[in-house]
Image: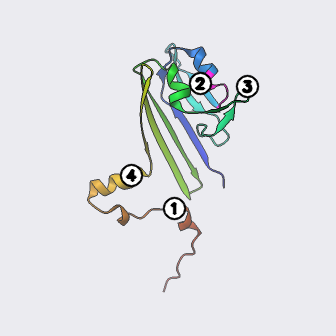
């Protein structure tokens, strides 16, 4: 079974819309305008699996380019704006994935932070004062095992 994702960002002010449009050309990412604010957009993944691109692709000059928010998107976001990118998906019930990253442009510098759904195990262990190993996970191999017979 193939993984299926949904991915998008929040709305942010873009200071160079044409530059961002050009920067996004090699990638399956749509730029969606805000309905009432000028130069405010969100990005939506339009890849086959619905997630933001993560692999190298070739541009018009056959050069390999890599999609990262830091290099492809943030140079065009207005300084001081925080871009939040979220992605969630699943492979049936066997694996559920989720990721969120936040990016802040300060001049030529981009600061970032990220979390994923699996971070909940560490957070729960710390919050509830239990060992992370004491919290059962539900992973793909758990579905492939035969259930023990009841006595």
Residue that carries the numbered disc 2 in the rendered image: 31
The local crowd at label 4, few if under 14, some if 14 to 19, many if 20 or more residues have their Cα within 10 Å, is: few
Q: CA distance from mark 1 to mark 3?
A: 42 Å
Residue positioned 63% across, 40% down in the render: 55
Is disc 1 placed on a helix, strand or loop? Answer: loop
- Residue, far left: 129
Viewer-closest of 66 and 141: 66
Label 4 secondary element: helix
Stretch of the chain drawn in magenta: 23-28
How far apart marks 4 and 2 lie (CA) works out to: 31 Å
The mark that comes first in sequence, 4 or 2, is 2
Q: Residue at x 52, y 52 (%)?
A: 96
Q: How was this image coloured? A: rainbow
Label 3, residues with CA under 10 Å away: few <14, some 14-19, many ≥20 = few
Indicate whether residue 138 is drawn in magenta. Answer: no
N-terminal label among 3 and 2: 2
Instruction: Please say if the residues under marks 4 and 2 sit with CB atoms less than 8 Å apart.
Output: no
Distance (Cα) linking label 3 and label 4: 43 Å
- Main SS of the magenta segment? loop
Quarter-of-image position of residue 108: top left
Image disc number at residue 139 = 1
Where residue 56 appears, as percent x and y from the top left, is: 65, 37
Residue at numbered disc 3: 61
């Amino acid at each position: 079974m193939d993984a299926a994702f949904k991915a998008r960002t929040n709305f942010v002010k873009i200071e160079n819309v044409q530059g961002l449009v050009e920067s996004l050309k090699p990638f399956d990412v749509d730029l969606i305008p805000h309905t009432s604010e000028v130069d405010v957009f969100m990005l939506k993944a339009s890849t086959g699996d619905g997630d933001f691109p993560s692999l190298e692709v070739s541009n018009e000059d056959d050069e390999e380019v890599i999609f990262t928010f830091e290099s492809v998107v943030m140079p065009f976001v207005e300084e001081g704006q925080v871009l939040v990118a979220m992605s969630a998906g699943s492979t049936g019930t066997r694996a559920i994935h989720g990721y969120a990253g936040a990016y802040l442009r300060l001049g030529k510098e981009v600061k970032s932070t990220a979390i994923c759904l699996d971070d909940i195990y560490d957070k729960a262990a710390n919050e509830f004062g239990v060992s992370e190993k004491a919290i059962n996970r539900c992973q793909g191999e758990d579905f492939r095992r035969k259930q023990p017979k009841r006595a």
